């Protein structure tokens, strides 16, 4: 009996050592991403213009990295906060910890090299080598055309510096370990020619976060198989309001199957009208996380390409209740 207990004790000790060593490896050796490259992005007028378009209207970096006023419909940007960071992603929204959108103005990035910014955007690794929680979908940014990433970097350098700092993020267990395994080496793809409409639309749909927000993940953060673009991901706004992403598949009953291309484009462009003013939202009234006023600035050609791509995805019957208020 004593030998058995001794054996069990040795086994438990051995297992604890192995697990401890494994966790230490994950924490100390990962993410296994190379040092930032020696990169100097030439800030040409063309790159700055393209980067501004992407940051405001496609990848919408300015959505999370600025302040949004959710007392107004769709939470338009608060003037004068462009790039200052501060958005919080925590348990209220279903995140495994507390994470913050960082200040991406030159106030915070002045000591970052272009190579370090590039690595953060495309691999999810900070200046100090620690991982970034993928609320910023760097997995998809790492698949963008490298030139588009360079354009975003060039534009960020032109932002007005805003003095603002954010607390350090804190991931819950076991995400604090899992987080170290997520960053990946970028696999850039050339942006398709605009004449290849469906391929070009796919490039935009992933770069713009359509897939990210409109594909529900499981409780481990992995996208549900067979539910691409079918919506159903719910977000708690923190005031009792819960918004759920819409079904973008061509299903005729629950998705966009009955939308014409003209109606799809008009849905966005309604918020680009010079006379549009975001209405005040009362307590419990319908609101959305969808940054309509930002995507409204997307070129008509680009919106049309996204529509043509969405027509090609598998139709999924998934009825979504887009808004619920539970005080």
Image (cartoon, rainbow, N blue to C red):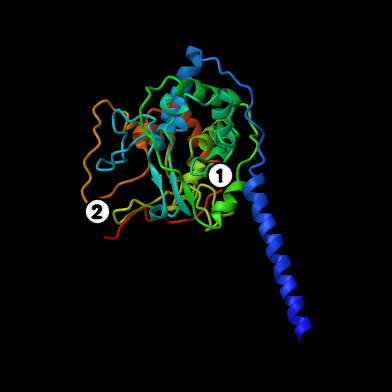
Residue 251, horizontal then vertical, whole percent? 48, 50
Specify the farthest residue to the bottom.
Answer: 1
Secondary structure found at label 2: loop
Q: Nearer the viewer, residue 138 or 171?
A: 171
Q: Nearer the viewer, residue 109 or 74?
A: 109
Q: Is 70 drawn above or below residue 161 in the view shown?
A: below
Q: Is 113 drawn above or below residue 226 in the view shown?
A: above
Question: Can residue 217 be seen at all in this image of the molecule?
Answer: yes
Quadrant in the picture for residue 56? top left
Q: Which residue corresponds to the image point at 38% horizontal and 41% vertical from the top-left?
A: 87
Quadrant in the picture for residue 6? bottom right
Q: Is 258 drawn above or below residue 207 in the view shown?
A: below
Specify the farthest residue to the top.
Answer: 45
In the image, which disc is placed on residue 284? 2
Give neighbour class at mark 2: few <14, some 14-19, many 20+ (Cα, 10 Å): some
Question: Can residue 223 be seen at all in this image of the molecule?
Answer: no
Quadrant the C terminus occupies: bottom left
In the figure, is residue 257 to the left or right of 20?
A: left
In the image, which disc is placed on residue 313? 1
| Marks 1,2: beta carbons within 8 A | no
Residue 132, horizontal then vertical, whole percent? 53, 42
Secondary structure found at label 1: loop
């Amino acid at each position: 009996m004593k030998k058995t207990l001794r054996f069990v004790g040795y086994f438990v000790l051995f297992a604890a050592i192995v697990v401890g060593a494994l966790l230490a490896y994950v924490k100390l050796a990962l993410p296994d991403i190379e040092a930032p490259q020696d990169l100097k992005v030439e800030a040409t007028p063309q790159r700055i213009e393209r980067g501004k378009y992407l940051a405001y209207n496609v990848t919408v970096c300015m959505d999370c990295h600025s302040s949004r006023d959710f007392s107004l419909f769709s939470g338009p940007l608060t003037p004068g906060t462009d790039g200052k960071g501060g958005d919080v992603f925590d348990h209220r929204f279903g995140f495994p910890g507390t994470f913050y959108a960082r200040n991406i103005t030159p106030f915070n990035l002045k000591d970052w090299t272009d190579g370090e910014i590039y690595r953060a955007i495309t691999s999810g690794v900070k200046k100090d080598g620690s991982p970034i929680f993928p609320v910023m979908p760097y997995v998809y940014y790492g698949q963008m055309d490298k030139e588009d990433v360079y354009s975003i970097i060039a534009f960020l350098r032109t932002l007005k510096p805003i003095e603002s700092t954010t607390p350090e993020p804190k991931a819950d267990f076991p995400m604090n370990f899992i987080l170290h395994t997520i960053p990946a080496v970028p696999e850039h793809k050339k942006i398709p020619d605009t004449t290849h409409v469906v391929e070009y639309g796919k490039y935009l749909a992933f770069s713009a976060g359509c897939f990210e927000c409109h594909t529900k993940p499981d409780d481990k953060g992995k996208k549900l198989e067979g539910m691409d673009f079918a919506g159903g991901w719910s977000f708690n706004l923190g005031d009792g309001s819960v918004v759920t992403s819409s079904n973008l598949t061509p299903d005729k009953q629950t998705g966009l199957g009955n939308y014409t291309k003209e109606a799809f484009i008009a849905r966005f462009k309604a918020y680009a009208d010079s006379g549009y003013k975001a209405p005040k939202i009362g307590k419990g009234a319908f609101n959305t996380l969808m940054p309509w006023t930002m995507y409204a600035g997307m070129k008509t050609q680009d919106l049309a390409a996204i529509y043509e791509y969405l027509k090609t995805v598998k139709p999924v019957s998934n009825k979504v209740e887009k808004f619920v208020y539970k005080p």
